[in-house]
Amino acid sequence: MLDTGIIFSLLIESFFFILWIKFTRSGESRSRDIVSGAMFLIALFILYRIFKLNLDFGLVLAIATLIAALSWILGRVIKLDDLRTESKSYFFILLVITCIRSFAYEPYQIPSRSMVPGLQVGDFVLVNKHAYGLKFPGTNYLLTELSPPNRNDVAVFIPPHTLCETKPTDARPDLADLTTAESQLFLSKFKNLQESRCVPLGIKFVKRIIGIPGDDIEIKGYEIWVNGQKLKQEVISSSSQENLIKETLDQGVHVIRTLGLSDYAQHQWKVPNGSYLAIGDNRDNSLDSRAWGYFSEDYLIGRADYIWMQWRSFSELPSFTRNTKIQ
């Protein structure tokens, strides 16, 4: 359901737009400038609400591009050169930004420590939007055939517990195959997570894919078996605070972090069709498939390919020392 504040602001913006046309045509430049200022402030408020509500910015850009195109056409119809010229310039700028962000690369900022040490809080990564197939902006509708993710991909996706309409059986279709104790534990975890974290459009997560459809995955403590094969792990450093371990998954090598909190945890999955299993590299500080189950291929956003900047907070200057390809 669309936010009432955004709806009200859009109605006011439309009213001021009509006034802007009226004052422009009548040559009342002072009144037009006042209205332009008001429209700018309302636009800032709408953007604030969009980010506050975690609305899909790709869809917002697509709508803004459409509005610019309609304004351009309106300017031609009513023979208003100012409207036609400004709308035309905005249209092409928005069209280029929309195409790049929707079909090429989207910037994403790492919000938590779940992928430490590879990805740090404040890292800005480039998400490859065409790695798994092109989607219509702001939707899950595929414009091309799905290109399935590989094991070891660092993927950006929307997990099931952040979507308010998702049922526990969507996150664990194999729920009936679990023991009573296991199914009850999962149901309790999932419902608690969903009640505290879900929003209508979900929240983007970034994790490493360890299980693809058909895989048998087993975790005992920090050891992982994929289809009966134990992943190779090599301790790089160990201290009283953390352990850093080089882990090999298929042909990919990455570093994970452990704190010794999950030594006795055990999990077992048979990944169903259309679903994926993902966990964080910071194994003791990651909310992942161990808690909320599988995520659906319908909610794949893209693959995180590069770190291009780090900016922890507004009180610090951006840094480009961590620029690297994501392993």
Image (cartoon, rainbow, N blue to C red):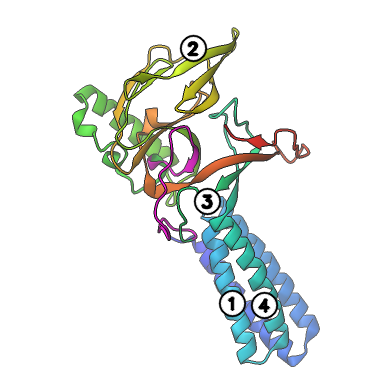
Q: Residue furthest right?
A: 30
Residue numbers of the magenta segment: 137-160
Badge number at residue 69: 1
- Does dot 2 land on a helix, a strand or a loop? loop
- Does dot 1 land on a helix, a strand or a loop? helix
Residue 126 lies in what quarter of the image? top right
The residue labelled by disc 4 is 88
Q: Residues within 10 Å of mark 1 (few under 14, many from 20)?
A: many
In the image, residue 98 sits, relative to residue 132, either above or below, namely: below
Q: Nearer the viewer, mark 2 or mark 3?
A: 3
The residue labelled by disc 2 is 260
Residue 244 lies in what quarter of the image? top right
Please state which amino acid type lies under the numbered disc 2. Answer: Gly
Q: Please name the residue shown 70% across and 68% down the image.
A: 40
Q: Earlier in the sequence, mark 3 or mark 4?
A: 4
Q: Earlier in the sequence, mark 2 or mark 4?
A: 4
Please state which amino acid type lies under the numbered disc 4. Answer: Lys
The answer to whether residue 211 of the structure is visible from this angle is yes
Residue 157 percent location from the top left of the image: 46, 43
Badge number at residue 129: 3
Q: Please name the residue shown 62% across and 40% down the image.
A: 306
